[in-house]
Amino acid sequence: MKKFLLVMAAVLGMAVVAAAQPRAIGIRAGYGAELSYQHTLGGENFGEIDLGWSAGAIQAGLAYDFLIAPLGPINFYAGPQAFVGLASTTDAEGNAKQGLWLGAGAQLGFEYFFDAIPLQLSLDWKPSLLIIPGLGFGWTSIALGIRYAF
């Protein structure tokens, strides 16, 4: 639990330290829901910090995305991600317990920026490899993002 809180503090600290560069804040909704913050990291690359919850679990993720094909208001992007999470589960006897997980993966998607209003829409997919507590693959993390760009 202490490690999870330390990682959460580091992720949120990075968001607070962000300088005056283009950024966006909003939500991602798919299997669960996430608060999402994007920050330009120089050039056309950007970082994304997500804090999400679904079905008794909470997860924090960090992605570094590269713009693959900027086409006017539409951008295609991809990059690596890492995540850590905590979930409430029950064992075979019905006892409640907390479970910590850690993993890595990718983020692939596209985003659309509106010219007249500071709104960004995105659709992305985050395939992931669970490392702790055991190896596993997740491929169902598709989400729609709605963010205020500033």
Image (cartoon, rainbow, N blue to C red):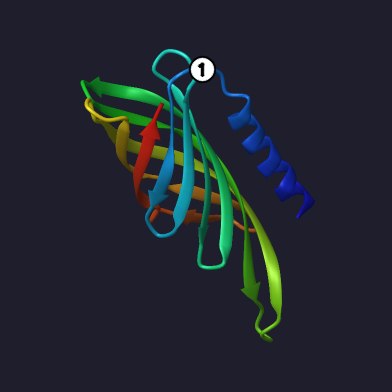
Q: Residue furthest top?
A: 43
Element class at badge 1 = loop
Q: Is residue 12 left or right of residue 33?
A: right
Amino acid tagged 1: Ala
> Mark 1 sits on what residue?
20
Quadrant location of the N terminus in the rendered image: bottom right
Q: Is residue 2 left or right of residue 62?
A: right
Residue placed at 56% from the left, 18% from the top?
A: 19
Quadrant location of the C terminus in the rendered image: top left
Q: Is residue 92 above or below residue 121?
A: below
Classify residue 99 by image quadrant.
Answer: bottom right
Q: Is residue 50 left or right of residue 93?
A: left
Q: How many marks?
A: 1
| Residues packed near mark 1 inside 10 Å, few (<14), some (14 to 19) or many (20 plus) | few
Q: Is residue 64 above or below residue 59?
A: above
Residue 44: x, y in percent? 39, 17
> Which of the two residues, 37 or 20, is positioned nearer the viewer here?
20
Q: Residue furthest front?
A: 117
Q: Is residue 27 left or right of residue 101?
A: left
Residue 6: x, y in percent? 74, 43
Q: Is residue 95 above or below residue 112?
A: below
Q: Is residue 51 above or below residue 57?
A: above
Residue placed at 57% from the left, 52% from the top?
A: 59
Classify residue 104 by image quadrant.
Answer: top right
Residue 119: x, y in percent? 31, 34
Classify residue 89 by image quadrant.
Answer: bottom right
Residue 144: x, y in percent? 32, 48
Residue placed at 26% from the left, 21% from the top?
A: 70
Q: Residue furthest bottom?
A: 93
